[in-house]
Image (cartoon, rainbow, N blue to C red):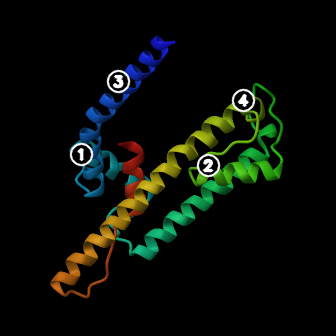
Amino acid sequence: MLSIHLQSAALLAGFLALLAAASVPVGRLLTAVARDRAPRWAATLDARLMRASGLDREAGFTPLAYGAALLAFNVLGFAALFLMLRFQGHLPINPTAAPDMPWVTALHTAASFVTNTNQQFYAGESAVSALTQTAGLLVQNVLSAATGIAFAFAFIRAVAQRCTREAAQENAPVTVGNPWRDLLRIVLW
C-alpha cells in the first residue's frame, strides 16, 4: 500500500516540476501574444491568414466592440455545434451510427462546450459521432479557451491603457486590440 502512495507522490512531484519548468516559456509566449510582439514566422503567418480571410489586421476595437465580436463568435460557434449535435445522425463520419441528439441534450452540450465548462450527461463515444467529436466538441474546446484568453488580454489592455491615459490626462478612446488577430494567434501559437 505504501508503494502506491510513494508512486503517486513521485508522479505528482514530477508533474509539478514539469509545470514549473514550462511556466516561464509559456508565460513569455503569452506575453508576446498579448503585447503583439510576434516572432517573424508567426507575424508572417498571421498576416497571410488575416489577408486571406479579408479581415482588417490593423483595426483596433473599443472594449464594447471587442466584447461584441467575441460574443458573436461564440453565438455562431454555439449554433454550429448545436446543429451538428441535433443532426449528427444525418452527417458523414458516423461509424457508430450515433443518432441525432435530443434537443435538450444538444442545447446543454453546446452551451457547456462553448462556455468551456464541458459538462456531458450522455454516453460519450456511443452518443456522439466521430465527426461531431472532432469538428464540433474538440474545436469548441480549443475556441472556448481561446476566447477566454482573448477576453483576458483585452481586459488587461483596457486597464493598462486607462491607467496610462489617466496619468497623462488624455481623453482619446481606449482600443483593446483586434479580437480576430488575438484569436488567431492564441489558437496558432
Three-letter code, disc 1: Arg
Instruction: Say whether residue 187 is left or right of residue 19.
Output: right
Residue highlighted by disc 1: 28
Residue highlighted by disc 2: 113
Residue highlighted by disc 4: 125
Three-letter code, disc 4: Glu
CA separation in Å, label 2 and label 4: 16 Å
Quick check: 27 above or below 73?
Answer: above
On the image, the x and y values in percent for residue 15 come to: 37, 28
* Towards the viewer: 78 or 120: 120
Of circles 1 and 3, which is in front?
A: 3
Q: Earlier in the sequence, mark 2 or mark 3?
A: 3
Circle 1 residues within 10 Å: few <14, some 14–19, many ≥20: few
Circle 4 residues within 10 Å: few <14, some 14–19, many ≥20: few
**Residue 14's mark?**
3
**Residue 115's mark?**
none
Q: Residue at x 25, y 49 (%)?
A: 38
Q: Earlier in the sequence, mark 1 or mark 2?
A: 1
* Towards the viewer: 85 or 18: 18
Three-letter code, disc 2: Phe
Q: Earlier in the sequence, mark 1 or mark 3?
A: 3
